[in-house]
Amino acid sequence: MLVIEMESGQVMKFELDEENAPITCANIKKLANENFYEGIIFHRIIKDFMIQGGDPTGTGMGGSKDEIKGEFKSNGVNNTHKHKRGTISMARTQIKDSASSQFFICHVDTPFLDGEYAAFGDMVEGFDVLDEIANRKTGFNDKPIVPPVIKRVYIED
């Protein structure tokens, strides 16, 4: 179970899909165990689409030192995990193997992302937190006026 704990004390929990996205799950676990996400914000919020975080610069341009293979159909990987409300998936550039630490959580079902991004888990708790974050006021580049801050991300048995 992947747990995202916010500075507010709120939590979102995700059941990881290691069968469809083993590389992605191993990467997120490694980063969580290194405390990589402490103090990082959700820097991009688009209500009725998704919330995005995991960039240490808070700009959408940063990431961890390692990039991983994009585990999705258009990149030759048979990942059948669907993007639906509460799905957690890896963000990337137009380069298919550019994912590192940035991730997004779908606010609503987003089937047009299926096969194009590496979905790697589903929310099992914290939909109220997802909705609260998704409803925050944003400014330029969908950046929240008051960014939600991640206290920590960890793995729970």
Image (spheres, helix red, strand yellow):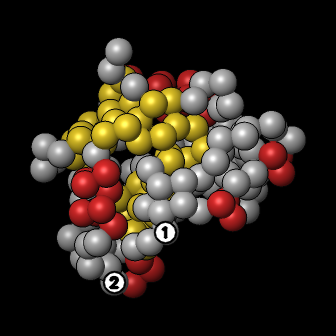
Q: Give the distance between the C-alpha atoms of the residues marked 2 and 1, in whole angstroms.
A: 16 Å
Q: Secondary structure at mark 1?
A: loop
Would you identify the image quadrant in which residue 69 lies?
top right
Taking 108 as reference, is 21 above or below it? above
Name the residue at 59% across, 62% down.
Answer: 110
Counting from the top left corner in percent of width and height, residue 73 is at 81, 46
Would you identify the image quadrant in which residue 94 lies?
bottom right
Which numbered circle lies on residue 73? none
Counting from the top left corner in percent of width and height, residue 134 is at 33, 67
Mark 1 residue crowding within 10 angstroms, few (<14) / some (14–19) / many (20+): some
Which numbered circle lies on residue 49? 1
Q: Identify the amino acid type marked 1.
A: Phe
Q: Nearer the viewer, residue 156 or 140?
A: 156
Counting from the top left corner in percent of width and height, residue 5 is at 24, 40
Q: Secondary structure at mark 2?
A: loop
Question: Visible in this render: residue 93?
Answer: no
Mark 2 or 1, closer to the camera: 1
Name the residue at 73% across, 38% down.
Answer: 79
Total label count?
Answer: 2
- 156 vs 98, left or right, is left
Q: Which residue is mark 2?
A: 139
Q: Nearer the viewer, residue 52 or 50?
A: 50
Would you identify the image quadrant in which residue 47 lies?
bottom left
Mark 2 residue crowding within 10 angstroms, few (<14) / some (14–19) / many (20+): few
Question: Visible in this render: residue 76?
Answer: yes
